[in-house]
Image (tube, grey):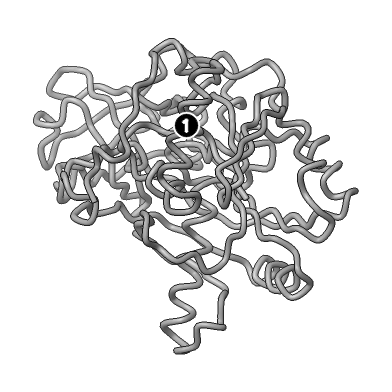
Amino acid sequence: MNKNDFSFELPEELIAQTPIEKRDQSRLLCLDRRTGKTRHKSFFELPGLLRRGDCLVLNDSRVLPARLIGNRKTGGAVEVVLLRDLGDDVWECLTRPGKKSRIGSEIVFGEGELTAVVTDVADGGNRHIKFHYDGLFLENLEQLGKMPLPPYIHEELEDAERYQTVYSRQQGSAAAPTAGLHFTNELLERLGANGVELCYLTLHVGLGTFRPVKADLVEDHKMHAEYFTIPAETSETIARAKKNGGRIIAVGTTSCRALESSAQRSIQAHGNAECRMQNAEFEFTDIFIYPGYEFKVIDGLITNFHLPESTLIMLVSAFAGRENVLRAYKEAIDNRYRFFSFGDAMFIV
């Protein structure tokens, strides 16, 4: 399977640069993955598209203000983006310019309340950086850091909370789980009042989610690893909904990857294909889902529109069929939908 099989032409003006004024006013393209038929709705109409007993699984990860601008003690500005907490105040980071961030380089942020030293060079060129500070690290980040917006967004974000879901709780992502940006607290309340189960997991999104697929053959691509955890309460809610005939709807590709990773490990551990879910604590997943994958947990997916040739459009194509997805994307383009992180959404069942 070639990565070019997942290519499409997108007019640049359809790449949303700013969030819509009210989160749930975004458009919603509904796709029947069995027939390929589509319907055009608004996101606030979601409660009418779900059934009593359905289960929505949401990723409650919260984006760190992980982009720091500092200066090397030897002179020159450096940008540091936190990617992964390695413990003991050491983080795997993306640095620009990278070549000048040598082992032993010292970096000062702000007025010196946060300093750092490059301790190692990781595979792929990322740096391991140890931070020094007074007080709490997160408080220093809140004061000095900025949101690490995707590279296709060129405008500054006026309100940083618009790059967070309203239910974000667990600090750790370098990018937002964007399918959840469409939900408001009022919409969540309406869903619960209609008998839809809501449950949460955590998958901390890495900047690798924007990494292009460089291998011509899809099967040769290596996914980045991301941390996830699935609480026992969520596993029990999903099992109960399945038993009672409810559909499991993943909100976002991140929730999907966590659920499917957990199911795969459960099957491997128990040797039983009927054992679909297990709790997961402090796990890492590098699962790569592309056409041919057999889904074990989810029955539906809420997701944004993704970049051409990305691992995300490959996952969606695995769930709904490549031809169905590309045809739906063309329809979205023809109807001037907004694309990518701050864009409109799809509901696929």
| Classed neighbour count for the residue bearing mark 1: other residues with Cα under 10 Å, few (<14), some (14–19), many (≥20) | many
Q: Residue furthest bottom?
A: 271
Residue type (three-letter) at the residue carrying disc 1: Pro
Q: What residue appears at the point 55 percent right and 20 percent down from the top-left corner?
A: 337
Q: Residue furthest right?
A: 193
Total labels: the figure holds 1
Q: Is residue 311 visible?
A: yes
Residue 278 x %, y %: 56, 76
Q: Nearer the viewer, residue 142 or 244?
A: 244
Residue 230 x %, y %: 57, 65
Residue 218 vertical position relative to residue 154 in the rendered view, above or below: below
Q: Nearer the viewer, residue 346 or 147?
A: 346
Residue 315 falls left or right of residue 7? right
Residue 169 falls left or right of residue 338? right
Residue 335 x %, y %: 56, 18
* Residue 182, picture quadrant: top right
In this figure, which residue is indicated by the disc labeled 1?
A: 65
Q: Nearer the viewer, residue 68 or 41?
A: 41
Badge 1 element: loop
Residue 107 vertical position relative to residue 335 in the rendered view, above or below: below
